[in-house]
Amino acid sequence: MTLSGPIDFKPKLISCLKDYSFQRFKTDLIAGIVVGIVALPLAVAFAIASGVSPSVGLITAIIGGFLVSALGGCSVQIGGPTGAFIIIIYGIIESFGLEGLAIATFMAGLILVLLGMFHLGTVIKFIPYPIVVGFTAGIALTIFSTQMNDFFGLGLTDVPAAFIPKWGVYFSNFGNIDLVTTGVAFISLLIIIAVPKISKKLPGSLISIVIVTFGVWLLNSYFPEYHITTIGDRFGNMATDLPQPEGFSLSMETINALLPSAFTIAILGAIESLLSATVADGVTGSHTRSNTELIGQGVANIVVPFFGGIPVTGAIARTMTNITNGGRTPVAGIIHSVVLLLIFLFMMPLINLVPMSCLAAVLIMVSYNMSGWRTVKGILKNPKSDVSVLIVTFLLTVIFDLTIAIEIGLLLAIILFLRRVTENTQIKVYGDQLDIAEGTESTKHEVLDVAHGVQVYEIDGPFFFGIATKFEEMTRSTIGDKPLVRIIRMRKVPFIDATAVHNLELLIKSSQEDGIHVVLSGVNDNVKAVLEHVGIDKMIGKDHVCPHITIAVKMANKLAVQLSGK
């Protein structure tokens, strides 16, 4: 991974089409149709749960799904709205309105493009697993809690957004449960659970919606006194025309206010899409171009808000559906978008008939699958640091919001990582004799005699701000010995940061003021370039930067003899 070099943007669609065949198209066509049908209820459900119209969910899946497949770095990735974004979208709309959501999504798209351009696709994959599991489980519980009103037909119109007050309102209104609505919801849930047991290829959510919608239509038609609320009742008859692109106004005040939310959307989208791509690679044996995938996801999120859409990312469930039905190129994802477009243009009146309680059942099943309770159970057996990160991220996601959870979760993970690196990086002090083969696999030992007045400090690991202070304290603790020469052995230092460079400069200056020479040994090319850039070699003299410890000790011994003879 580098932060320089040419932009890594090579869409898989281009490379896949070079050897494309009619046989491959047939399998992609079947997979695309199936995925489009599976994506329909999810796109509608996620949109409603996020606080927007069902048509917005379909528009997002159509445009976003097309762009992710056409420009992404994964051959089988299916993009669209996902459950992970529900909470953040709902919060943005509540605070900033739909225009605020469009701006945040647009900014998130720009961030994703920049992440890909700066070759950070690989780095995103290194976000600690406990954080991903923690906020995914937290999102699952939050989604579950948002569906109680429609699932039980409570009829509440002003439900608090916060988790604890929300459940307080639920408990105080459970006496208003509508038994018919609840019955419809439970039947929907049972169908969703039962269908995969018959065949894993059958889309349980869609079959549940079709069966229950027909039953509710009959019920509403012949027994209007038991009327069940539908999408049409909640949102009215939705337009079937594709929306025209619309702009939005930007100001520094708006950008500053929405930047944290945009960052959350970008990081969450990057994590979810690359996680989905990693899972897909494990099944298909392909290799995702991570940076290209981020750029493709970014472009999708830049374009979608101009058409009123919500954030887009790779969807694991839909991607796996694509794979299991034979999809192997981005053409399947493009076909999935075309299928959704045809449904949007010609079948929207039927979507108006879908019961809200049925959609609540779909989302409850989604939240169960997202929860990953078996994974959570497994992580609880891990070291306490991993468990604490998971629990903190989970609680912050549920009690506060996803933005805070991701920010603090990442901060915790960084702190724990730095602590582990600091603990593993060792600093040793040698005098009198030095075995140059120590710390290597070599069986040939060569012992160097170190003259009186020479001290050797060996840094084993990254020399960064976490170690710089430790090294400084160690040199101070030996200052009473008044060495004549200090050798700093850096053969095992892979990199050095600004804090370590600054501390090294201070050590050299203080040593020179006390008449102590400083010799560097075994500096690798990368670290040497940094030291030369800031002029460390000129401070100590270029001849004091030695390629090997044997040369460094020989020079130091000679200097010690000369200095002691004065």
Image (cartoon, rainbow, N blue to C red):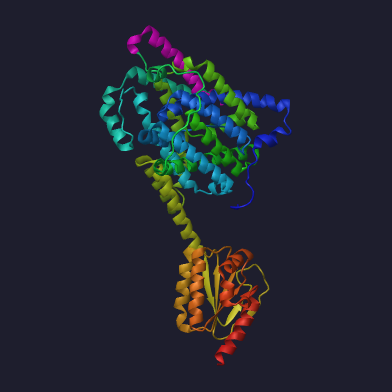
In the image, farthest residue toward the bottom? 566
Q: Nearer the viewer, residue 280 or 464?
A: 464
The quarter of the displayed image where residue 180 is located: top left
Is 229 displayed left or right of 292 in the figure? left
Q: Nearer the viewer, residue 383 or 278?
A: 278
Residue 193 seen: no
Residue drawn 58% across the image and 66% down it: 533
Residue 211 sits above or below residue 439 on the image: above
The quarter of the displayed image where residue 94 is located: top left
Which residues are the magenta region?
198-226
Percent across and percent down for residue 316 are: 54, 35
Residue drawn 52% across the image and 36% down it: 302
Name the image quarter holding the C terminus: bottom right
The quarter of the displayed image where residue 528 is located: bottom right
Residue 244 seen: yes
Residue 524 sits above or below residue 306 on the image: below
Residue 340 sits above or below residue 440 on the image: above
Is 248 displayed left or right of 458 in the figure? left
Is 258 displayed left or right of 462 in the figure? left
Question: Magenta: predominant secondary structure element?
Answer: helix
Percent across and percent down for residue 31 are: 62, 26
Counting every numbered tag in the picture gives 0
The verdict on residue 308 being magenta is: no
Q: Nearer the viewer, residue 178 or 114?
A: 114
Residue 431 sits above or below residue 121 on the image: below
Percent across and percent down for residue 562 are: 59, 89
Residue drawn 69% across the image and 37% down it: 15
Percent across and percent down for residue 417 are: 48, 56
